[in-house]
Amino acid sequence: MKSFYPFIYLLLFTMLSQWAMAQSIRKNYQEMTDYEKTELVNAFYSIRSTTAGGTDRITDMANFHMDYFNFDNININRLDIHFNLPDEPEKEIFLAWHRRFIFEMEQVMQDINPKLTLPYWDSTTDQSVNSELWDEDFMGSFNTNWNLNRNLSSFGTLPTAQEIVNMSAETDFFEFSDFFERQRPHAGAHRWVFGPMITSASPRDPVFYLHHTFVDKVWHDWEETHHNSVYIRTNMLRYDGTYTFNGVTLPVVNPNDIIDSRALGVFYAENGLAVLDNYIVSNTYNPEELFYYRYTIEAGTNFIAAENTTSHLQSVSEVILKPGFLAESGANFRASIDTETTSLLAKNSLRKVAREKNPFDEVDLEQVWMWSEGDIDPDDPTVVMQTFPNPFDSQITIKLSKKKDCVIEIYNLVGALIKQEFFEFTDTIVINDLYGLASGTYVVKVVDANGKTLVAKKVIKI
Ligand SMILES: [Cu+2]
């Protein structure tokens, strides 16, 4: 027997004590209460100070991201997670990999507080360095305590909403994913925040997770419109059944299985409304699925609380069950209003804890900064090179301290020559057409007519 729960069923009693694992209604961080923000910040601190085998989860995830960032110049057949090319087998993996990656962090957070979900930072509208995003009580907290050395808005610019609209009109998935990854809609925030965010160690900065939740939402919206995401690969790095953290092997994930974010129980709320649709409660990830949201939850079209499953829709204001919602007989389903959290919203009950200073290892950080001042040739100390911009995108300008006949050579980090150009008696050199170069670290050398390296400098390609 199946039955529709009547509309009136929303006014249920409040559950006081059941501490459930959550699924996820994600929202703009601007919809978070002070209580939620404090809990989110506390969770990041707590995760960072909980080590297993000497490594905490944030560091472990940042290290993985760094270790598998991009191998295009070393071995095109070696899998990586960023800046794939059309002939690589994992070519569009960026979106699916980061979807699963932020979900991993969200699950760790929900072990701490099941009502937490990753919020998103909409970088198309929220572009001020004075935004509440950067408040000392929120993301600003980590800058000094974790030694992030952000430098907001010093480098690069954030995308416009129109750019997202234009980008989302693309119907080919690879074209969409590739543009998204390389251009301002994704890369903009990495550059603009600076610090670890502009390096392959970007998951060291908690704002990485708020940025990538926004990226994930934009993909979700694109997929809802075009239904055209598809992957060649059937597994992913880290989620291939071989990676273990704290004695737990991370599951095998086929990127094609998470094209719809509902596969992970993830929904995106907007403007005070969370629409839960086309979802079957399965308890795959959690023995009780909690969908928690401060404002209106509307469960309708094909939201099915299946037989023998346990689920709970909980709002601080209202839960609405609309036609198309179905609770099968034998389903343990509840909808409730959270009066417990409402009381916790009161200012005096914020669970503030001392912020622990926990700077990232400096030596590590130097390795990931990936650019340095030029090394001066001891035999000709008057030749000094400046390169700008650094990081660069499509073009590098090189200034020498004196005019030279020279060859400019660009090498990747394993020493393969990528580009070589000859210049006659000049001190200003412009290298163009670097746009297609894979992201990563390169070495620029100024070589004289006898093949002697005068000066070399590391540069980074965004
Ligand atoms: Cu990434």
Image: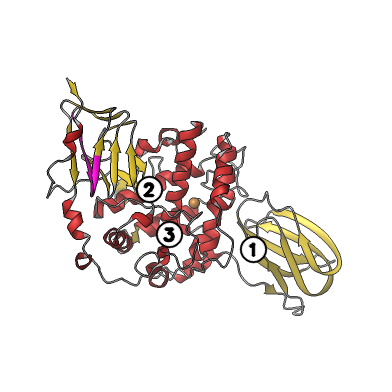
Disc 2 marks which amino acid?
Answer: Asn
Q: Earlier in the sequence, mark 1 or mark 2?
A: 2
Q: Residues within 10 Å of mark 2 (few under 14, many from 20)?
A: few
From the image, state whether disc 3 or disc 2 is nearer to you: 2
Disc 1 marks which amino acid?
Answer: Val
Residue 328 rendering spot, x and y as whole percentages? 20, 26
Q: Is residue 370 magenta?
A: no
Stretch of the chain drawn in magenta: 308-319
Which residue shows up at 20% across the image and 55% down it? 341
The residue that mark 1 highlights is 459
Q: Please give the label number shown on residue 361.
A: none
The residue that mark 2 highlights is 271
The reply to whether the residue tagged 2 has its Cβ within 8 angstroms of ligand 1 is no
The residue that mark 3 highlights is 207
Secondary element at image label 2? loop
Residue 251 rendering spot, x and y as whole percentages? 35, 40
Q: Residues within 10 Å of mark 3 (few under 14, many from 20)?
A: many
**Observer-nearest residue: 173 or 337?**
337
From the image, state whether disc 3 or disc 1 is nearer to you: 3
Q: Earlier in the sequence, mark 3 or mark 1?
A: 3
